[in-house]
Image (cartoon, rainbow, N blue to C red):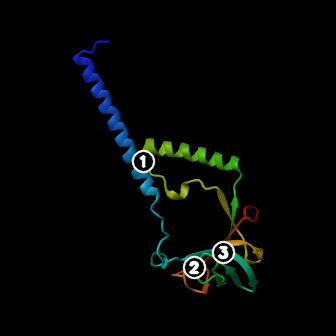
Amino acid sequence: MQTTPLHKYFFAGAAAALALILFAWHNGYSAGFKTSAVPTQTAPPQLLSGATSVSGKIIDITDTVLTITAPDSTPVIRKVLTDPGTVFGLKVLKDQKTFQSDILAFDLKLKTAQINGTPVSPGEYPTPFTFKKIFLSDLRKGDMVTITATGAILSKGEFTAMSVIAQDRSTQ
């Protein structure tokens, strides 16, 4: 087969394009590999020092005092005082059909808001659970709870709770 100058340019262009593709692939692969090799770190304790909530498992209930174990924090064992102002709640998981219905209703509301130019508040977003008001007497040993208090409680072994929210026992 006889080649013409046009064929030479075609083959040279194809070779150059292939070289660029291989170069770009290698650099992209290397960059992604190097990025994924960088170890991730947890937030330094000084960033969490203002934490106002802690989660854990109830290990004892005496009068109006809950003792919880929170393995991911220091101290691990905490005494949580409750008073008449403490709010108790239970997070109950919605069934999938109800949650899907909530999502579809919110999607419609969002589209309408976009057309009308009205904002949608974050409190209107659907959640996979509902809150039910409960009492201290409804809590049991072994319940998983999230305690919220005023002020930084990260290193406190004892504090007064503003709210105690328990997880539904069926999801623990």
User: Mark 3 — residue?
Assistant: 56
* Left or right relative to 60: residue 128: left
Q: Amino acid at mark 1?
A: Tyr
Check residue 63 in the rendering and tell me which mark sits there, or answer none. none
Q: Considering the image in quadrants, where does the N terminus appear?
A: top left
Q: Which residue is nearer to you in this view: 56 or 145?
A: 56
Q: Earlier in the sequence, mark 3 or mark 1?
A: 1
Pointer 1 residue: 29
Residue under pointer 2: 149
Q: Earlier in the sequence, mark 3 or mark 2?
A: 3
- How many angstroms separate mark 3 from mark 1 (CA)? 42 Å
Q: How far apart in space, not on screen, are marks 1 and 2 (Cα)?
A: 47 Å
- Give coordinates of residue 151: x percent, y percent: 51, 82
**Marks 3 and 2: which is nearer the front?**
3
Which residue sits at x=48%, y=68%? 41
What secondary structure is marked by label 3? strand
| Cα distance between the residues tagged 3 and 2 | 14 Å
Near-viewer residue (42 or 144): 42
Give me the residue at 48% from left, 79% from top: 49
Under tag 1, what secondary structure?
helix
Q: Image quarter for residue 85? A: bottom right
